[in-house]
Image (cartoon, helix red, strand yellow):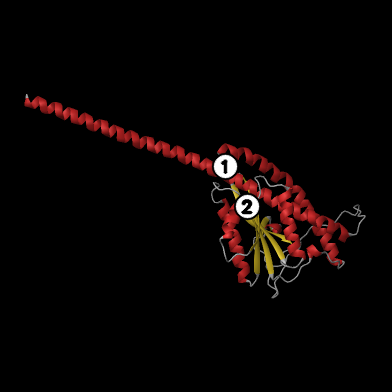
Amino acid sequence: MKLVAAARVRKAQEAVISSRPFVEKLVEFLYVINEQLQLDDIDVPLTNIRPVKKVAIVIITGDRGLCGGFNKAVIKKAENRMVELKDMGLDCVVISVGKKGNAYFRHRSNVSVIRCIEGEGFYTVKEAQTIADNVFSLFVSEEVDKVELVYTKFVSLVKSDPVIHTLLPLSMKGVICNENGMCVDAVEDELFRLTTNEGKMIVERDSVTFNKGELSPLMLFEQDPAQILDAMMPLYMNSQILRALQESFASEVAARMSAMSTATDNADELKKNLSVAYNQERQAKITGELLEIVAGAEALTQFD
């Protein structure tokens, strides 16, 4: 299983690395367009910021086990976030992705699960589109006021971190609040980890200035900015969700490879220890039999 996981992790890692530049540039572009629209007071449904009463959390887990604490870590992250939201007086609903998460949350009566989605190994645009359709309908119909992704971010073959990522609305950190004006952004929200101080990455709870620069004056748009944003927001949602699925899958197979490597090393160590114990027991038994033979021969000599 270690070799199988190693073969799959390379494909998953390449998918993650190749998708990151496009997604980051897309978000950067949409931020600039969205800022311009807010200055012009143009309404775009997917960027509307309203007082938060209900939050939808998309939780991405694995489809199989034998991957160490991978599934447990992301589920714990999601449960901690749900407790935090409830302490703020907010309701939350769950869209569960992955067989392990589905099986876990089905038996939790205190968790409102509105949709369970299962993939078939490597996630594709099809699964991302299914999740995006559910998220879109919930947010536009105002059933929820905020959508968050909870998934495992792929860092390296030996390290991965569960993170919280704000999907909707597209906004700056610190501006999404509940009815009492309290910020409801996660402290470690992955989407907003771009604030720095003296070269070190930091996260601030209050509203921050997000320097994204200006569009090139040579760039011309044939359509109205609102039309461009309406056309690109579905692409934004699909790309963000697909990236989260790919990151989670890469983290899962890397965790499985590491777990199988550890299991192999433990099995080798156990085999070695058992061999030593067996040899010690065998030598003790042989030594005991030799002593009995020598003692018997000595007794016969004394009798003669």
- In the image shown, does 35 or 100 lie closer to the viewer? 100
Near mark 1 (Cα within 10 A), the count class, few <14, some 14-19 or many ≥20, is many
x and y percentages locating residue 79 in the rendered image: 59, 62
Q: Nearer the viewer, residue 21 or 124?
A: 124
> Looking at the image, which residue is at 82% across and 55% down?
232
At x 7%, y 26%, the residue is 303
In the image, residue 178 above or below residue 200: below
Question: Taking 293 as reference, is 216 left or right?
Answer: right
> Mark 2 touching mark 1, by CB under 8 A?
no
Instruction: Give residue 23's position: percent from left, percent from top.
Output: 75, 51
Residue type marked 2: Gly
Q: List x then y, in percent, for residue 58.
A: 67, 58
Q: Secondary structure at mark 1?
A: helix
Position of residue 129 measured from the top left corner of the image (x, y, whole percent):
74, 53
Q: Earlier in the sequence, mark 2 or mark 1?
A: 2
Q: In the rendered image, is residue 260 in sight?
A: yes
Q: CA distance from mark 2 to mark 1?
A: 19 Å
Compared with 243, 57 (above or below) is below
**Which residue is denoted by mark 1 in the rendering?**
257
For the C terminus, the quadrant is top left
- Image quarter of the N terminus: top right
Q: Amino acid at mark 1?
A: Met
Q: Which mark is residue 98?
A: 2
Residue furthest toward the left? 304
The quarter holding residue 144 reads bottom right
